[in-house]
Image: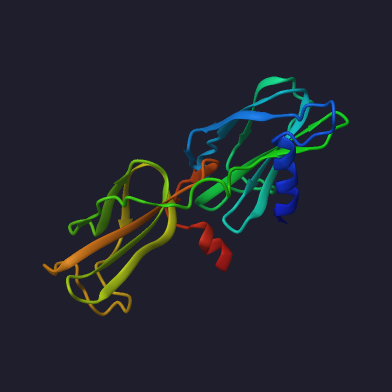
Amino acid sequence: MTVRLRAIAFAASALALGFAAPGHAALEITNVSHAPAAIDSTKRQSVEIRFRISEPARVTLRIFDGRDLMVRGIPSAKILAAGDQRLSWDGRDAKGQPVPPEAYVYTLTATPGGGAPVEHDLTDLSGNEEIAPPTVRWDSAKHLVRYELAAPARLKIRTGLANGPLLKTVIDGVARAAGPHAEPWDGKDESGLIDAAKNPDLQLSAQAWSLSKNAIVVLPDPEGRTDRDARRA
């Protein structure tokens, strides 16, 4: 895997802002968007990244995980014409394997003929702001913590007793797509000795942080494996 070089990204951003050679306008990457916002990589779903370039260029789409490591580079098959263009990612790494569920970010690098590359990267320019948390509720019958998100976010959900101790961190810094969610919890504390599932003083709390505008959420698999699990493997 490849670590992103911030200095190169900054230089490319400077070019995109207009610091070009005298008499030559800098190539621009604009109108960048992606859809859908979340995919299931185990089902061969793909996300399409749309953009506009101001002059013909070869464009490379790069995907990075939560460690800032590049998991996939996807160059355009040919020099793309000026105007609206698109590239896609199928949720797989450079070896063709489905990536673990998490939030991934993408960059676009356009290289015009005989010119310097220009990069579009919103990773450090958006997201990571604490936002209003969702309302969480305990489904005691099915042992699930339920909530709904209006937009993709990174979450921490904890359970505890009113005026008492913290019992369990159900999820910690996990990325989730917009929509309804159900997180499994057996109702016990971290030690597994105290069962507070039916305690009348049970309380649930949540914190949420926005994702960057170039984030793609890869949905959880049935085993609940996440990118953080892959880091520990």
| Pick the front one: 63 or 45 | 63
Pinpoint residue 73: horizontal percent, then vertical percent: 71, 43
- Name which quarter of the figure residue 140 lies in: bottom left
Which quarter of the image is occupied by the N terminus? bottom right
Residue sticking out furthest to the front: 22
Pinpoint residue 39: horizontal percent, then vertical percent: 49, 40
Pinpoint residue 60: horizontal percent, then vertical percent: 72, 37
Residue sticking out furthest to the right: 114
Residue 134 in view, yes or no: yes
- Name which quarter of the figure residue 143 lies in: bottom left
Q: Tell me how the rendering is colored.
A: rainbow
Pinpoint residue 27: horizontal percent, then vertical percent: 75, 29
Residue drawn at 54 percent across, 33 percent down: 34
User: For this view, does 146 lie left or right of residue 231?
Assistant: left
| Pick the front one: 231 or 32 | 32
Q: Relative to 214, does residue 173 appear above or below in the rendering?
A: below
User: For this view, does 34 lie left or right of residue 138?
Assistant: right
